[in-house]
Image (cartoon, grey):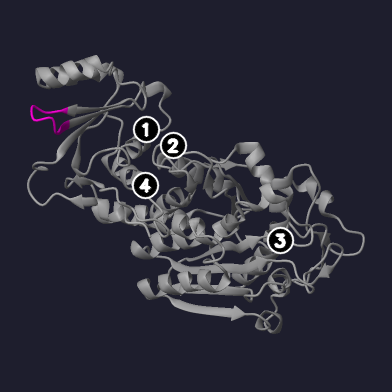
Amino acid sequence: MSHSTTLIRPSERDGTGAAIAVHVLRPDAVQGALQSLSDLQSGYAEARGFAGEAGQTVVLPGEDGAVAAVLLGAGAKDSDLEREMRVGQLPGGLPAGEYTLASLPDDFSARLATIAWGMGSYRFTRYLKDAREPALLVVGEEVDVVGARAAVAATALGRDLINTPAGDMGPVALAKAARDLAQEHGAEYSAVVGEELLEQNYPMIHAVGRAAHEAPRLVELEWGDPDHPRLAVIGKGITFDTGGVNMKGASGARLMKKDMGGAAHALALSHMIMAAKLPIRLHCLLAIAENAVSANAYRPGDILDSRTGLTVEIDNTDAEGRLVLGDALCKASESKPALMIDFATLTGAARVALGPQLPPFFTNRDALHEPVSEHCMKELDPVWPMPLWQPYHAMLRSPIADMKNAGGRFAGAVTAALFLERFVADTPWMHFDVYGWNPSARAGHPKGADVYAVRGLFSWLAAGGLNTRLER
């Protein structure tokens, strides 16, 4: 569906030959750069008012009228939060051809700029004929092309899965995507489906998905050397969320094809780990169901059993993601991993607090806050730490069960995280409440599905993150 990785290739010769030069410039570097151009090109840039302002783009013509060079403004360094990601605005608007990043600001990484190009090249074309000829980036030896392509491919995988409508991305199709990824990397694949969920003690996954025409399931991938540190990556895979009996309105339901975004994130991170052959024993778990409405749908007021033995009173059937995750987290913790990471498109409260671009993350190990935040910021994949404020457990109290599945209108992202915490025992754990969607396009991030935190987490893991001391 997406061919972003094919739009990045290594140079086949010394230098980049006939590739069109792209100059990414801060305002204080513009004058010197213009002096190195021909009179025609510098005059053209000046006539267009190019001053290196953030996002400013000028395509320079040659004597024959063809594209000779491209100028991209990076803006002032002290106010530039997007940095290399600005390069991602170029490929969608440039004429077909081969380009090279001939000059970058001193504080830019050629690797990140290459990844940004790939991310900005993304187009979801499953239902469209894409007639536009792509702009291809040629990179030199200073860039690890294999690593850059893997990062772009992981992002494209997640975007493709989320962009695909529920009619073509139900539980069966999402499980197949996981199985295909397992086959690509030689991982072990298994699934517990339908009534087997009750037999093998996943009652909340079964309850949420039992009303749908495709059976709910828990999908697992195992990969890597068993002697390496064990990492569990868990994803919420609600392929469509009607809200259940507490049904959503039309506007709320419109984007619910993306409610399996947590599973897409989990597969994207798993892909990066396996492609890089990190020294990790990976356990990926996807809790997959469609939250549908039928005669046998679970109801407000019902009491559900869970894998841990805790009972849950259903306050709202639209708080279903935490239910399926609860069983999956419990299963993951049983293998005693060094760390568990879950992704979920879980709460509107997280979007109200931090918007679509900045996912909050929660952890039961304070030592993870700083290094994870730093790696994510370095990779232009930012996250924001949020508190597991224990007094708010009171909002989840039930008079007839161990807890409710929703805590009311206050602190919705926090109470959802606190609910999940009840299923992780004492295992080190991080929870990312992602949106999975861009309401509008920005550099490197086309409108539509998107993947957050994955590149930053991979950076942290590749740097030995699982060796962090995680005692309480």
Q: Residue at x 36, y 57 (%)?
A: 2
Q: Residue at x 88, y 58 (%)?
A: 398
On the image, the x and y values in percent for residue 208 come to 71, 68
Q: Within 10 angstroms of label 3, few (less than 14), some, or many (20 or more) residues? A: many
The residue wearing badge 3 is 320
The residue wearing badge 2 is 442
Give the mark toward the camera: 1 or 4. Answer: 4
**Distance of label 2 from label 3 (alpha carbons):** 31 Å
Q: Within 10 angstroms of label 4, few (less than 14), some, or many (20 or more) residues? A: many
**Distance of label 3 from label 1 (alpha carbons):** 38 Å
Mark toward the start of the polypeptide (1 vs 4): 1
**Distance of label 1 from label 4 (alpha carbons):** 14 Å
Mark toward the start of the polypeptide (3 vs 1): 1
**Distance of label 4 from label 3 (alpha carbons):** 31 Å
Can you tell which quarter of the image residue 85 is in? top left
Classify 177 as above or below 45. Answer: below
Q: Amino acid at mark 2?
A: Arg
Q: Secondary structure at mark 3?
A: loop
Can I make out residue 147 in this image?
A: no
